[in-house]
Amino acid sequence: MSAAGPSGAIARGRLGDSVLEEEEALGKAYDTRLLRRLWPYVAPFRAQVALTLVMALPIFVFELAPAWIIRVGLDTLLLASGAGAHAAAGSTAAADGLLVRIDAALAPLFEGRSIAWLAGLLLLSLIVGAALRFAHLILMARTGQLAMRRLRNDVFGHIHSLHLSFFDRHPVGRLVTRASNDTENIAEMFSQGIVAAVIDVFFMLGYAVVLWNIDSQLATRVFLVVPILATCALVFRLRIREAFRKVRVRIARINAVVQETVTGMKVVQLFRREERNARDFDDLNGSHRDAWVESIRYDAALFSVVEVAGGLSVAIIIGYGWGIATAGVLYLFIDYMRRFFLPLRDLSAKYSVMQSAMASCERVFALMDTEPQIQDRAAGAEPRSAQRAVGERSSIETQTDGPTRGAADSMSLTAPQASEAQAGPPGRARSEPQASEVPMRAGEVVFENVWFSYQDPAEEDWILRDLSFRVAPGERVAFVGATGAGKTTIIKLLARFYDVDRGRVLLDGVDLRELPQRDLRRRVATVLQDVFLFSGTVAENIHLGRGDIDRARVEWAAEAVQADRFIRALPHGYDTELRERGSNLSAGQRQLLSFARALAHGSQVLVLDEATSSVDPETELMVQRGLHALMERQTALVIAHRLSTIQDADRIYVLRRGELVEVGTHDELMASEGTYHRLYRLQFDSQRAKSA
């Protein structure tokens, strides 16, 4: 299957333009601006960072020690047998160099000692060096994880605060990557990136200084290889950068296609697209293989160049040093030069880690810089004159067709009716403090000349157009209309998932923008058509971790909405574990749990958005009985396609293209023979045809 196929188009088109464009930009391997932003997360652990750097010195000493001990053993054996006397006499370093000074300081360790003693000393130095390396790696990794734990918590918390429209535009997979893979890439920078690179540079300089002090002439000739190697490394670095970018883009495409295919597996199997999807995936997999082979080719080339440079340095050491240095000194040079070149062999890996970490930093902080569009009013800020709503309510004009207009006007101007607070279960203690800045009232909802668009308002693609209505406390109203009429948008505005472009939405006479979001959503309970359940027990999915909702209230709420019947039939009742998204429950059972959740959390306004669309008629009868008692003392807004479920509503609003076209009771709207009458007859005729 070529790229012309549908899923191939997905893999190379839409996914490449949106999800993948951020993955393509790897950015710099070192960005001071990003590191400054990262510092507040590292600063609390600066003692560990300092210790990580300080530990490099003893590690370096124990890196030097093994070769030094072997040098002493070689020179001692050769000198003792006389084989190395000529070489020692010609050594430029043995007379007054670094060797003499260090040998003099360490003389008590070596003079008169046997080879067994040197072997034991060598083993001890190797063990201590390995232990220091182990502790150093653990410290670096732990420091990175501690710092990234705070960053990951901040990213996760910030995602919670973002507005709903943000999630409409950004794929879930990308946000998951920000909170997981990207922060892990940054943590890896501490263990294999910037700290490791600084220590590698320190070690390389240390080896160079030591070798220069042992024999400057030999060191000068050996280090002639370094400029050539540095030039090759620079060239390969640029090639490797591009190769790793290709690998990153292609693995991102593979992940995106796998995620989309698994999510839509039901459709894939129903329409027998397995073979076609497999061919498209094979194309993507092949391109990833080619990109990976290319990166390995450059990585292997750099590794080979370093190996050649190491071999060339050994040849120079032996060719120039033979006859002017002892065998031990030659071994010392060979070992230290090998260690000098080791960091260069890992250059591509460290460069990739740094580049990936900087790109992850860029993306994480771009997310953190995203300001939530829906924010609570700051303390002390000038209010939006929301309290004028009561005095200005007479300005609300309800747009209607036909004879129901006058009835709607008179109803919308009715004075607020007091209602009692919602009654809880017997013995319930209302212990949760109220965070509202305004006193709790009865649950009056007013939309006042509301205009709203999901797009830029300048484009005038309005979903709601000058919409005005009022729901009195304790009333039960319904919204009907064709798909796209704006019914669900009303619910989103009432829950303040979005802010209106023009006009106001009032709850008990207060503009929603003046209410803290936590308080607003405590007072408005919403049951959506698409029920989301979390992994956990049935009881946990009802109380959602709120400490003030005890087991008695959970069971009371479930019983009130008739959910306790199937819950008690589960293997462990309320303690039954639910799988992801409640997949071990039927659609109707999941919706019953959502009703119990809304009731247990308590509210003044109850919103049902197509809440009975997934239940069978028998289950719907049970739900209706449970909800009837619930809605008696609450303001209720119901959106339903099944017009038979809203016939007893106090008032029905009929929407068309974001405008209110009819208002009245079921009998009034049927008598007017307008839009509602046509919708009802169409649905009734369709149901009768199915039953026939």
Image (cartoon, rainbow, N blue to C red):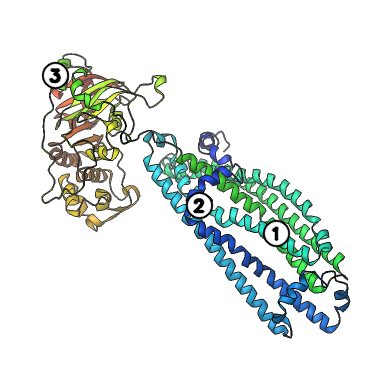
**Picture residue at 86% right of the left edge, 82% below the top:** 82
Depth check: give the residue in front, 459 or 361.
361
Element type at mark 2: helix
> Of the residues shown, which amino acid type is indicated by label 1?
Met
> Of the residues shown, which amino acid type is indicated by label 2?
Glu
Depth check: give the residue in front, 236 or 268.
236
The residue pinned by badge 2 equals 184
Measured from the top left, where is residue 307 in percent x and y?
Answer: 75, 59
The residue pinned by badge 1 equals 204
Q: Earlier in the sequence, mark 2 or mark 1?
A: 2
* 202 up-or-down from 654: above or below: below
Nearer the observer: mark 3 or 1; the answer is 1
Measured from the top left, where is residue 528 in percent x and y?
Answer: 28, 38
Screen quadrant of the C terminus: top left
Measured from the top left, where is residue 585 in percent x and y?
Answer: 28, 49
The disc label shown at residue 410, or none: 3
Alpha-carbon distance for marks 2 and 1? 28 Å
Element type at mark 3: helix
